[in-house]
Image (cartoon, grey):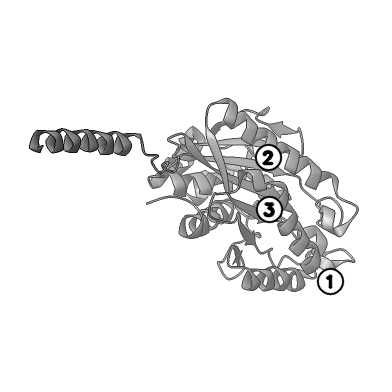
């Protein structure tokens, strides 16, 4: 009798062990060792980069100018300026001077890459730049919710998605962390400046919708919005900047940069006959720094 009970207990124990071994387990949350962070840079000429590289030796010094010319291998960019005037031909290349309106000019990407590369990103950072000078949100960048969608809005979305797919083809897993927007000058000197707030609200919402496939898993795509300068040609700059600041106050993922308060200058280069429509060389670098600082603080995975 005792032997029979002992045998029965052994059988039950074996059954329990088998059941434990065969019980379903909770699947682990997938992780991607090949995740990369995508930053988008859009806008008109101060995003495109109409600032001349030749002035950097004087404004930032020879050593720093050489650093910018050599570039940053750990921050890559795919860029299309004035559609095809200066482009990386759809390829990601290290950020360096010469990726602006022409090969002799540069944009905010230099300052962005300098700041980001000086830290240790948890995941690599790729910049996608699509910019065109002398263009407006009223027409060229107008988004679908505002009707009569602009050619640059459509072109930008197509270009960004194309570059993200290219990263996937490289066996990478891209997430669009933030969009940097340097635009508004053209609208400030036009007739529809009072519509800027509504147009930009639609623009931000539509971009987030159209790029949602690549949004971060548990976050919204950030929007870093640079104010325009008080250049005399931008007669309604206050209206434009007030609209940007108001939108930022309504959305925790929308950040406004006050470029006037930050001291960005436009009246020093070239000496004697300054190009007042575009930021001076040191200020264009600083614009990139400001973009990067806001992204690092709120949107990028950087220790």
Residue at the front extreme, as displayed: 1
Residue 139, given in percent of the width and then of the height, sits at 87, 54
Q: Earlier in the sequence, mark 2 or mark 1?
A: 2
Residue to which mark 2 is pinned? 160
Tell me, yes or no, if residue 31 can be seen here: yes
The residue shown at (41%, 42%) is 28
* Residue 15 at x, y percent in the picture: 27, 35
Answer above or below: position of 277 versus 81: below
Marks 3 and 1, Cα distance to the nearest angstrom? 23 Å
* Residue 208: image tag: 3
Mark 3 or mark 1: name the one nearer the start of the chain: 1
Disc 2 to disc 1, C-alpha distance: 29 Å
Task: Point out residue 64 in the picture as x, y percentages from the top left corner.
Answer: 44, 43
- How many neighbours does mark 1 have within 10 angstroms: few (below 14), some (14-19), or many (20 or more)? some
Residue farthest toward the left in the current orientation of the protein: 2
Image depth: mark 3 or mark 1 in front:
3
Residue under the image location 85 percent in, 49 percent down: 150
Q: What residue did someone put label 1 on?
A: 194
x and y percentages locating residue 17 in the rendered image: 25, 36
In the image, residue 140 above or below residue 253: above
Say which of marks 3 and 2 sits in front: 3
């Amino acid at each position: 009798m005792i032997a029979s009970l002992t045998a029965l207990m052994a059988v039950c124990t074996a059954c329990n062990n088998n059941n434990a071994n065969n019980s379903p387990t909770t699947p682990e949350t997938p992780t991607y060792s090949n995740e990369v962070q995508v930053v988008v840079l859009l806008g008109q000429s101060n995003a495109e980069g109409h600032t001349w590289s030749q002035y950097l030796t004087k404004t930032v010094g020879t050593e720093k100018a050489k650093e910018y010319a050599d570039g940053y291998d750990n921050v890559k960019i795919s860029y299309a300026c004035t559609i095809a005037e200066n482009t990386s031909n759809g390829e990601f290349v290290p950020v360096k001077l010469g990726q602006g309106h022409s090969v002799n000019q540069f944009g905010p990407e230099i300052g962005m890459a300098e700041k980001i590369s000086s830290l240790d990103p948890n995941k690599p950072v790729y910049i996608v730049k699509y910019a065109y000078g002398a263009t407006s949100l009223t027409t060229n960048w107008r988004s679908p919710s505002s009707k009569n969608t602009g050619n640059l809005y459509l072109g930008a979305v197509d270009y960004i998605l194309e570059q993200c797919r290219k990263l996937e083809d490289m066996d990478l897993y891209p997430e669009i962390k933030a969009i940097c927007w340097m635009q508004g000058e053209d609208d400030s000197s036009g007739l529809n400046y009072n519509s800027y707030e509504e147009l930009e609200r639609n623009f931000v919402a539509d971009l987030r919708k159209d790029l949602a496939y690549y949004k971060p898993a548990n976050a919204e795509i950030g929007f870093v919005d640079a104010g325009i300068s008080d250049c005399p040609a931008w007669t309604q700059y206050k209206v434009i900047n007030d609209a940007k600041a108001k939108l930022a106050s309504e959305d925790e993922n929308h950040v406004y940069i006050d470029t006037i308060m930050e001291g960005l200058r436009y009246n020093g280069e070239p000496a004697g006959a300054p190009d007042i429509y575009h930021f001076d060389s040191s200020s264009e670098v600083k614009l990139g720094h400001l973009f990067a600082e806001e992204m690092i603080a709120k949107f990028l995975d950087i220790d």
